[in-house]
Amino acid sequence: MVSNRDPHCPDLFTDLIMRSFEFYIGIDPGVLTGVCIWNHPHQTIERLQSMKIHEAFELIRAMHIEHPGKIMIRVEDARMRHWFNNSGSELWQGAGSIKRDCKIWEDYLTDLHIHFEMVAPRNNLTKLTRLAFGNITGYHAQSNEHQRAAAMLVYGL
């Protein structure tokens, strides 16, 4: 089930559906995919790491089997990014690769019938330093930019 709701215009029904999951999983696609598992009942980051895309798929499938209907995936969708600074061809090529990964995530989650939402990068707090991230979340262990972006997709839900 996909949702492209505008987070700035929530409605009561959508909010109730969003609050009914046990686990929210943030995905920041890339060469190494940032993954964060947010435990909603305990309001804690249960897992925060980077992994290869196929490892992230395996993790999502295992969570789906272990907690059917109780997980919600939020994927930062680079296809919704329509602004780029002056950048070289390498960055554009990398952006195309990440856009492809976003489509693969969308297809994968649709095929497994997992609840998910594709989130525009502008609707996520990204590029946080480790210190800023720790101040916001209380999570002070080592983390990288992709892990922190994944966490901010689900933190506090």
Image (tube, helix red, strand yellow):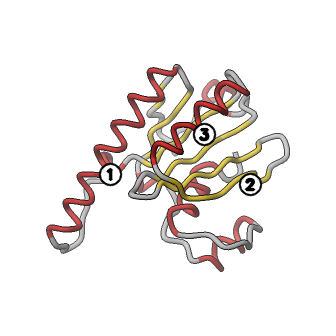
Residue 98 tag number: 1
Say if mark 2 contacts mark 3, CB within 8 Å: no
Residue 21 lies left or right of residue 8; in this view the side is right
- Location of residue 78 with respect to 11 vertically, above or below: below
Outermost residue, left side? 89
Q: Secondary structure at mark 3?
A: helix
Residue at horizontal 26 percent and vertical 54 percent from the top: 82
Residue 70: image x %, image y %? 71, 27
Residue 133 lies left or right of residue 117; in this view the side is right
Residue at horizontal 52 percent and vertical 48 percent from the top: 27
The answer to which of marks 2 and 1 sits earlier in the sequence is: 2
Residue wearing tag 3:
59
- Mark 3 → mark 1, Cα distance in angstroms: 19 Å
Residue 42 lies left or right of residue 119; in this view the side is right
Q: Amino acid at mark 2?
A: Ile
Residue at horizontal 42 percent and vertical 37 percent from the top: 105
Q: Secondary structure at mark 2?
A: strand
Residue 45: image x %, image y %? 74, 54
Residue wearing tag 2:
45
Which quadrant is home to the C terminus?
A: top right
Say if mark 2 contacts mark 1, CB within 8 Å: no
- Location of residue 7 with respect to 126 vertically, above or below: above
